[in-house]
Image (tube, grey):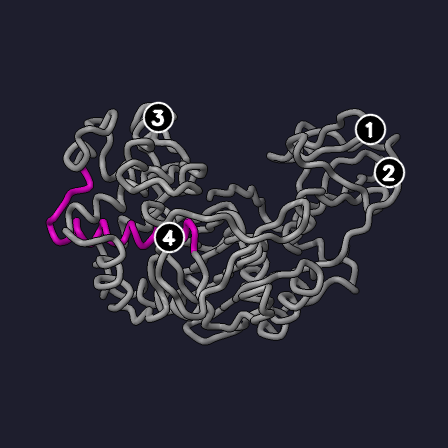
Amino acid sequence: MKKAHQITKLGLSLIFLLLPTLFFGQKDIPTNLAKYMQAQVDVNNFSGTVIVTKNGSILLKKAYGLADYEWNIKNTVDTKFQLASVTKQFTATAILQLVENGKLSLDDKLSKFFPDYPKADSVTIHMLLSHSSGLGLGFKELALTTISADSAYNEIKKIPYEFEPGTKSEYSNIGYYLLGKIIEKVSGEKYVVYLKKNIFEKVGMKNTGVSNNDSIISKKAKVYHITEKGYVHNPYINWTFNIGHDGTYSTVEDLALWDQALYGTTILSADMKKRMFTSYNNQGYGYGLMINPFYNHGHQLIAHDGGFFGTMTSFNRFTDDKIFVTVLSNNESPSYIIAYSLSAIALQKDVELPYKHHQVKADITQYDKYIGKYGEIEIFKNGEKLFYNSLEMELLPESKTKFFRADNNDRTVEFIQNKSGIYNSIILTKGGVKEIIMKNNL
């Protein structure tokens, strides 16, 4: 699942604007990482596992919450979690291995493997890897059925293209589903077998594999997602065909091994890694990874997030700083925001601890003074309510000038006056990281 989060340069001068009861500095990184995560547990009910390393040394490795709500079984650092779209990097790695071994080419057409697929002569392996094929986002409803793998393929190929192949870039799960099938065709092995032999075993990832609907997997967390009635079990997911873009499970310890392996050439040559870690468009799409996405704190970042119902994951490699941050959750905790905050702490930036937001009575007479565009953020009014970019993101007041997003209490907006009394900027807080954004056209 793709999430674009526009982050501008941090306003370091904000240090003097923060409430000291909610703010901590960065003198002791491991302690501050632990404090932040404990606040996520206490305030936001985080459930999952976290690892933060620098130069291969562990700054934080800890499990929180429950792997099984019914039996009150706690998560441990070796609990296995579904990875959702973090899977894509393993699919891309397998494809590049096959390229390196001369078994396929990045310029090969989809028609070479699936001649019956619509527009297959116009789609290349490169397009599938870099999300420029025009194929759609996904097939969520189909994945919740008991349909067979062959029948699923026949249904998926009916899904229309979003745009002409190669003309632009949009995130595509279907493209990676097809890449998973291409791996099987070219290697002559099942996707799960190929990944195990050529990636997981070579790296030493003993607790990583590909899900199916039959096997009993020890220490694998159950997954829960949030409804109006509270937490419920994840629905049935058909892992028979839901692979390539999704399907793998792992632990934070195994993913730390994978991070270290990516600095070497055991799995991929330097040339293949360069191809994998290149951004091929203005959205930062590499092969199975995002290259310097919006939330990179100004540091070189190779990353990918994932989410499917209660599974939420975030994989982040700050390659110049040799910092690795991964967050895996089984109860729909926003791992991408938590990883963003942990990364900021590891990079010795200033972070506000999570806290409970309490709505106060709004002073709607002030709303007209707040509305406008601040960078890429639009604040607008509809009736007697204030909104952030869309009607799905209402801003709720916690003070006269400070608001929190109703859909996400890890984000707040505070409106700031200049000396003339005009509200000309906002303090945007995401996951405890603050920045100043000026109002446009002032």
Q: Residues within 10 Å of mark 2 (few under 14, many from 20)?
A: some
Question: If you read the primary sequence from the N terminus, does the residue marked by circle 2 or circle 3 appear first?
Answer: 3
User: Can residue 337 be spotted in the picture?
Assistant: no
Say which element carries label 2: loop
Q: Residues within 10 Å of mark 1 (few under 14, many from 20)?
A: few
What residue lies at 43% left-to-right and 59% top-to-bottom?
A: 317
Dots 2, 4 in contact, CB < 8 A = no
Say which element carries label 4: loop
Q: CA distance from mark 3 to mark 1?
A: 40 Å
Q: CA distance from mark 2 to mark 3?
A: 45 Å
Residue matched to label 4: 247
Residue matched to label 3: 161
Q: Which of the two marks, 4 or 1, is nearer to us in this view?
A: 4
Nearer to us in this view, 270 or 198: 198
Amino acid beneath label 1: Glu
> How far across and how far down the image is residue 68, in percent?
55, 65
Residue 384 shows which numbered tag?
A: 1
Q: Residues within 10 Å of mark 4 (few under 14, many from 20)?
A: many
Nearer to us in this view, 155 or 436: 155
Q: CA distance from mark 1 to mark 2?
A: 9 Å
Dots 4, 3 in contact, CB < 8 A = no
Dots 2, 3 in contact, CB < 8 A = no
> How far across and how far down the image is residue 33, in percent?
60, 69
Say which element carries label 1: loop
Question: If you read the primary sequence from the N terminus, does the residue marked by circle 2 or circle 4 appear first?
Answer: 4
- Please name the predominant secondary structure of the magenta segment in the image: helix
What residue lies at 27% left-to-right and 57% top-to-bottom?
A: 192
Q: CA distance from mark 4 to mark 3?
A: 23 Å
> How far across and how far down the image is residue 218, in percent?
41, 70
Left or right: 76 as drawn, with respect to 103 = right
Q: Which residues are magenta?
A: 83-107
